[in-house]
Amino acid sequence: MPRRSKLVPGLLIAAALVMTSAGVGATALAASATDSAGAARTSAAAPAHAGHAAHGGHAADMAGDATGAGQAMGAMPPSTKSSAEDPDGDGYIPANPPVTGVEPSAAEPPHRYFHEFQANCSYTHAAPDDPIVFPGQPGKSHDHTFMGNTTTNAASTTASLDAGGTTCKAPGDKSGYWVPTLLRGDTPQPPVGPQTIYYKAGVTDYTSVRPFPKGLRFVVANPMQTAQQFRDNPGFVEGWECGDSYFNVDFPTDCPDSQDVQLNIRFQAPSCWDGVNLDTPDHVSHMAYPVVREGTNDNVCPADHPVALPMIEFKMAFPVNGDLSDVRLSSGASYSFHYDFFNAWDDATLAALVDHCIVGGLQCDARGYDETHPEAGAALDDNYELP
């Protein structure tokens, strides 16, 4: 069941995030945000302001909006430079075509415990870039660890990612995935080997899930969140894990000193889309977490974000263990963890995996194969490509 999320005035958090991403301290702003959060709560079942379908007056709208869409402290700063895909510079990148006429599905298909597949993508590089929050502004962000697309940088667009290479097992996944860099002291500790990124149903009607539109991008969680806001975020799964220690907001102090042990985190993304925007000025409000349908235990998309997309879940493993007292994130404390997703999947490949594994109610690997249901076959061939 989705947790309650806290709504914080967008302008305050936007200002704090600009300072944080640019490497400037924002302690006072963060404290003010914490005070405001307690007085601005709303149930996830009552979504706030939706993403705008029409253009005009967006700066004022964003300043007055809270984190809408059900994401705790999710407001992100308006970029000081617009994306190359946003020619009018208002922060909105419209879907072409938009998805209209969709109602959140209340259907209850036959129960299947799993409806998911994996994208296994390896580390590519690190850089102080963020093509979503700071497009076209290299060096302006805190350092990020990039996976998947090998070309992701501050200037990345849908077209440039589409033309790039990938470290994902499926060549059709050219998406960009990135997280704040984990450091031990001042030394980066990049993940080793393919990382697990789940694509799963976040709604009860798993048959209603459709593929991401090409070019969709969003930010999950927020580097300015407090420890409690990190814990209360609807995407929080088991927090920081190490050995037998789970549900940690801070890096665990009882992490075994063993070469077989790594620091892990799992965190889920919102999976309900407004059907209109590939991005919004705060990089959040076009997406929402599912809510519980009144009188049931069913998860459904809220009415203002009715389009069910795959729910991404990062399962990151960092090669650190033992004494973690000198471990930190480039964005700050352990609870500043967040991540970005920029969709550049080949449309046909993503559609095949979604239809076979999520809609089909299977637990698939990166080929779209469920070893417990071999009779179902695989979505992709031995080269992780469409047959």
Image (cartoon, rainbow, N blue to C red):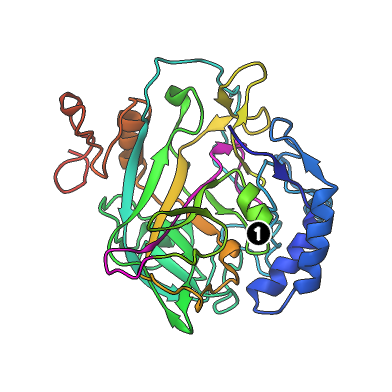
* Quadrant, the C terminus: top left
Percent from the top left, x then y, of residue 209? Answer: 46, 29
Q: For this rendering, which residue is in front, 192 or 89?
A: 192
Percent from the top left, x then y, of residue 257? Answer: 34, 70
Residue neighbourhood size for the residue with mark 1, other residues' Cα within 10 Å, grouped as few (<14), some (14–19), many (≥20): some
Q: Residue at x 58, y 32 (%)?
A: 1
Percent from the top left, x then y, of residue 76? Answer: 68, 59
Query: Magenta span has 221?
Result: no
Q: For this rendering, which residue is in front, 243 or 170?
A: 243
Q: Is residue 47 visible?
A: yes
Disc 1 on helix, strand or loop?
Answer: helix
Q: Look at the picture and state if 63 lies above or below 106.
A: below
Q: Look at the picture and state if 69 lies above or below 64.
A: above
Query: Magenta span has 275?
Result: yes
Q: Is residue 152 visible?
A: no
Q: Which residue is mark 1?
A: 227
Query: The residue under label 1 is which amino acid type?
Result: Ala
Q: Look at the picture and state if 186 lies above or below 55.
A: below
Q: For this rendering, which residue is in front, 35 or 88?
A: 35
Q: Residue at x 25, y 53 (%)?
A: 169
Q: Is residue 187 left or right of residue 340?
A: left
Given the current orientation, which residue lies at the most extreme left position? 382
Q: Is residue 183 left or right of residue 307?
A: left
Q: Which of the 4 image quadrants contains residue 300? A: top right
Q: Residue at x 62, y 37 (%)?
A: 274
Q: Residue at x 38, y 50 (%)?
A: 197
Image mark count: 1
Percent from the top left, x then y, of residue 323? Answer: 44, 74
Region rendered in magenta: 256-282
